Image (cartoon, rainbow, N blue to C red):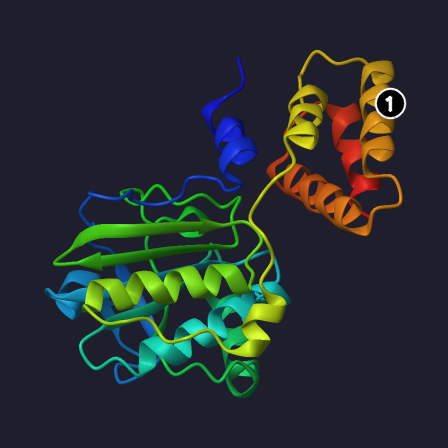
Amino acid sequence: MLPLLIAVLLYAGDFPSGPQVGDKLPDFKAHAHFGPDAGKEFKLHDKIKAGPTLLIFMHAPGDAAITRPGFQFIKPVDKYASEQEKLNTHIVWVTGDKEKVEGFLKRAETSLSLKSPVSICLDGGKDGPDTYGLNDKVQITVLVAKDNKVLANFALTDPNANDSRKVIEAVAKVLGKEPPKAQPEEKKKARPDGKSPELQKLVRAIIQKDNSDEDVKRIANMMIEWAGKDEKRQAELREYARTIVRAGYGNEYAQAAMKKLAE
């Protein structure tokens, strides 16, 4: 039987990360980097008290940078959130190397140009606060809450314009507002969320731990045949392959095959 995380990946497209809908927001300690409390340490509960809250956890890779898709996701969300007077917003970098993240944030301050408060989590190292259950297999974990209760959770392995829109809609809902209309450029960037059931079946097959090298080659060839010359299918295959490589699922043969298919 496949582990729960793989099942969620294949059927929902994302890994679970952070408190789920209905859970309370646990407290944690952070160091404020941008915003009114810059340079100070604080505890989350002292800042959000009650009311609507938007928490965005940035899972820092080895170089503490932000990926281009992550940047494209966060900019419209940050802009919308910064315009909401009654919203408690915190963008929190999760890392095992505070100094490296501080260096990155200082270098990138102008290019990031974030309007919401930015901080670095001080609890739990690269995994974040133990009480949050954050998953470092995702790039960004977003929690929308009210009165310390989670109302929406987004665990994003490959952020995109659709995700920005969904988060903004969730924030607008908790604020009791109508979400802003999507701009034409957002509609162009947005991509369908549907996943091919044929490819899902092949992915489930290739990540089985007891596969031989020949098994993996056979399934990988079936994936290539499925994609053919269809650019959309080729892009979907590459996306799946990259996700599986990042997650480390499958045996050594599967990982090698997925790396080639991800190119």
Outermost residue on the bottom side: it is 110
Could you say where residue 112 lies in the image, as x and y percent from the top left? 52, 80
In the depicted structure, whether residue 208 falls above or below residue 101: above
Write down the quadrant of residue 117 in the picture.
Answer: bottom left
Residue position marked by numbered label 1 in the rendering? 217
- The answer to whether one can see residue 131 in this image is yes
**Percent coordinates x, y for residue 99 in the rendering:** 48, 68
- Seen in the picture, residue 36 relative to 146 is either above or below; the reply is below
2 or 187, which is in the foreground?
Answer: 187
Q: Is residue 14 above or below residue 204?
A: below
Seen in the picture, residue 108 relative to 212 is either above or below; the reply is below
Q: Is residue 67 visible?
A: no
Q: Nearer the viewer, residue 104 or 223?
A: 223
Residue at image coords 50%, 42%? 14
| SS for callout 1 | helix
Q: Determine the residue positioned at 20% across, 54% down.
A: 27
Frontmost residue, 193 versus 98: 193
Residue 142: x %, y % from top left: 38, 57
Which amino acid lies under the numbered mark 1 shown in the image of this protein?
Answer: Lys
Q: Residue at x 46, y 25 (%)?
A: 4
Residue drawn at (56%, 69%), measured in percent from left and top? Answer: 187
Q: Position of residue 132 (x, y in %)?
A: 30, 45
- Decide if residue 73 is on the left or right side of residue 171: right
